[in-house]
Image (spheres, helix red, strand yellow):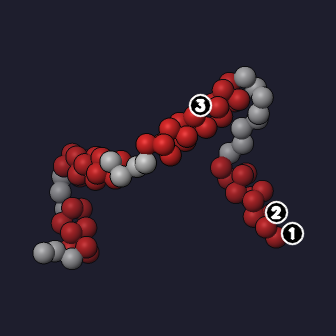
Amino acid sequence: MLSVEELIQEALSLPSSTRVFLVEKLIESLESDIDENIQKSWNIEAKKRQDEIRNHNVEPISGEIALAQIKQSLEK
């Protein structure tokens, strides 16, 4: 059996289309482990946030600004 490092090197040597296929299959395998209730809750929250932005109830900011604000609040 290959070590993780050997497996990574082997995967990286594959043609890009094959690597894409491999990644898709790995993601699919993880998605089957997702709790449906948790996923449903996240979908509801994402829809709510999308609606808030579209209705101009909130002003979106970039991830960079959000992280800077979090860092600043942690320093206080």
User: Would you place residue 30 above or below residue 61 in this image?
Assistant: below
Q: Which residue is mark 1?
A: 76
- Residue at horizontal 50 percent and vertical 46 percent from the top: 38
- The quadrant of the picture occupied by the N terminus is bottom left
What amino acid does circle 3 point to? Lys
Which class describes the residues within 10 Å of circle 2: few (<14), some (14-19), or many (20+)?
few
State the SS at label 1.
loop
Instruction: Using the rendered view, name the quadrant where residue 45 is placed.
Output: top right
Query: What amino acid type should be assigned to the residue bearing mark 2?
Result: Ser
Q: Is residue 61 left or right of residue 1?
A: right
Q: Secondary structure at mark 3?
A: helix
The foreground one among 24 and 38 is 38
Q: Which residue is denoted by mark 2 in the rendering? A: 73
**Quarter the C terminus occupies:** bottom right
Check disc 3: other Cα within 10 Å, few if <14, some if 14-19, many if 20+. few
Q: Amino acid at mark 1?
A: Lys
Left or right placement of residue 54 versus residue 76 in this view: left
Q: Is residue 59 visible?
A: yes
Q: Nearer the viewer, mark 3 or mark 1?
A: 3
- Precedes in sequence: disc 2 or disc 3: 3
Residue at the top extreme, as displayed: 55
Q: Tell me where residue 31 appears, x and y as whole percent.
A: 36, 47
CA gap between label 2 and label 3 equals 28 Å
Furthest toward the front, the residue is 37
Labels 1 & 2 near each other (Cβ < 8 A): yes
Q: Residue at x 59, y 31 (%)?
A: 47
Looking at the image, residue 34 sits to the left or right of residue 56; the answer is: left
For disc 3, the marked residue is: 47
Q: How many neighbours does mark 1 have within 10 angstroms: few (below 14), some (14-19), or many (20 or more)?
A: few
